[in-house]
Image: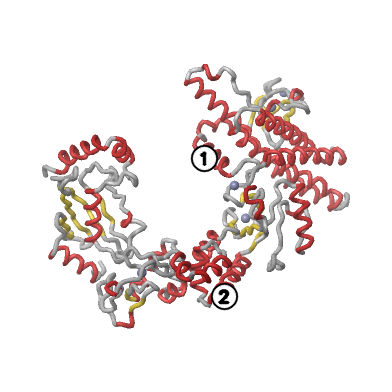
Amino acid sequence: MSAESDMEYSDNDGDDYDYYGEQDDCDMETVDRSKSDPEFFLYSCLKVEEVEKLLNESIELLSNSLQITPSLAKVMLHAYGWNAQEIINKYRENANEVLVYSRVKPRLPVGQANSSRTNCAVCANTPLLHKYSALACGHYFCNDCWAMHFEVQIMQGVSNTIQCMAQDCEVRAPEDFVLSHVTKPTLRERYQQFMFKDHVKSHPQLRFCPGPNCQWIFQAWTREGARRVECRGCELLTCFSCGAPHHAPTDCATIRRWLTKCADDSETANYISAHTKDCPKCQICIEKNGGCNHMQCGACRHDFCWVCSGDWKTHGSEYYECSRYKEDPNLANDSQHAQAREALKKYLHYYERWENHARSLKLEEQTLASLKSRINQKVMAGEGTWIDWQYLWDAARLLKRCRYTLQYTYPYAYYMEVGPRKELFEYQQAQLEAEIENLSWKVERAETTDRGDLENQMDIAEKRRTTLLKDFLEFNTNNASSSTKV
Amino acid sequence: MAALPRRIIKETQRLMQEPVPGISAVPSETNARYFHVIVTGPEDSPFEGGLFKLELFLPEDYPMSAPKVRFITKIYHPNIDRLGRICLDILKDKWSPALQIRTVLLSIQALLSAPNPDDPLANDVAELWKVNEIEAIRNAKEWTRRYAMDN
Ligand SMILES: [Zn+2]
Ligand SMILES: [Zn+2]
Ligand SMILES: [Zn+2]
Ligand SMILES: [Zn+2]
Ligand SMILES: [Zn+2]
Ligand SMILES: [Zn+2]
């Protein structure tokens, strides 16, 4: 790492850990944290200007080393995934090969017949000699036609990959050539915006935050890891590898399958989104207004589980039956119709829990907000300082993190094959779920809960979470050997 | 309407003076950017003997954008869908402003001679073309007889 001193690291959990900017500290901490936190991933959150600077460094390096224009350097960097060193090495071996691969030059030389400067093949006009121009391929067209070509391409959102106008010619128009023909300021600006977006997209180390209207860009510092990134702007958790919401312990391909399935089956699953349920004991209607799934009926004081309506006492600390789906052992003998019904039942089992935890997360978000204002009031009233109440805040944030992981354990379990590994997974999942509900219960009643008790519960829940992740989180360890920071 | 670009005038003149064998393209009397096209089914193809009507429209930014072409006559072909839309690379990403109406029509004619079921637009047709070419060709001949012959 060399040029990052002016960039801030944003770590996975915002303020849970110290920032570190120094190389030595950083390496030490990297080692420590990658051991203790299975989701640890080294990355930065950059502003547009910072990314521009970063890209410009590569462009400058390449154009200085090879003595080429920055425009050409951009074409080549785009083609080679921004690996300037690779380009420099290959260019020294065989410059022509690099130029052809980047589509700066045509593979075969262009014949004289295709490069007339008396008649423009596109508009069929006969402008003066000096009103023609061509890319490295030598396909001459009149400047008016080039301008119109670029305008149409830019309006379609094409930028780095605009090609020569000649038939079957794949030579790309570098930025300076395009800009020398495009005069409209709005169009030039649009072109440069598209160029920037395209550069970020073609850069393996960069990814736009997918949050709506969010301008932050993530920069990955390692090639492997859990790839969880949290945006400093909109706080969205994203998977750096695939751009979907962060999804540990589920892997990228599985979460894509799951989300597609949920979208396809949304009709059937709709009925689940009810926000009210009757108390299983006294049948009074109870509205769920907190994230906790441990419900207590206001009328009869019956404790029950929101998810399965079962008695909460049976959801004891050791075994939390509610999260485990029991496949019917007689399934194979059943008719096709029954199998389809069973498949839907299985899906709904996992989907209900997935949806329910998503909803709990949203509700707990509200709890977090009201907690913040309650703490503020206490501080204003002289009941201690922010530091005194910090633990409440930490508890609510930890709850959020734990429930988030729990939500994403359901797609994982859904696609797991039945067997001892799935049993172990669902056992750990059940334990995590039980501790999360305990924590949620305590956080909602935080001011009357003993601090030590709450902190103890936090510790247990987080331990369950990291244990599950350590045992089941799978990421691209195959290039772990190349874990050098870029 | 804006004056017709020289390029379109020249292309139209040439299409009238030296027509492509087996293809007629005549601009509409009311709109010089709209062409009535008739393509003759190529010899030794299941479309032989048929006359296929198409429409071709040159958009405002032609030739920077490709012409819009569509079959009006029903045709059983893996690269042409029920609405007559054509799956042809030069009408999409492989379009180049140096291509002409003439080249587009020639390519469509070639597509009739050599259907490409691996790049399908009409999935059911392409599927049959791959698993049972004989039956697919029989269907294509039948459709040619029914829709492209007596008018
Ligand atoms: Zn060219
Ligand atoms: Zn021209
Ligand atoms: Zn964001
Ligand atoms: Zn992912
Ligand atoms: Zn009750
Ligand atoms: Zn339950």
A417 relative to A83, above or below = above
Q: Residues within 10 Å of mark 2 (few under 14, many from 20)?
A: few
Q: Amino acid at mark 2?
A: Ser
Q: Name the residue rendered at 38%, 64% in the picture.
A: A170
Task: Measure how far apart labels 2 and 1 are at the Cα level.
Answer: 47 Å
Residue pointed to by mark 1: A260
Q: Residues within 10 Å of mark 1 (few under 14, many from 20)?
A: few
Q: Nearer the viewer, residue A373 or A110?
A: A110
Q: Which mark is residue A65?
A: 2
Task: Residue A214: give x, y in percent of width and height.
Answer: 59, 57
Q: Of label 2 and label 1, which has the lower sequence position?
A: 2
Q: Amino acid at mark 1?
A: Thr
SS for callout 2: helix
Task: Residue B50: give x, y in percent of width and height.
Answer: 15, 45
Q: Nearer the viewer, residue A392 or A199?
A: A199
| Image-quarter location of ligand 6 | top right
Q: Name the residue rendered at 29%, 82% in the picture.
A: A128
Task: Residue A22: give x, y in percent of width and height.
Answer: 77, 64
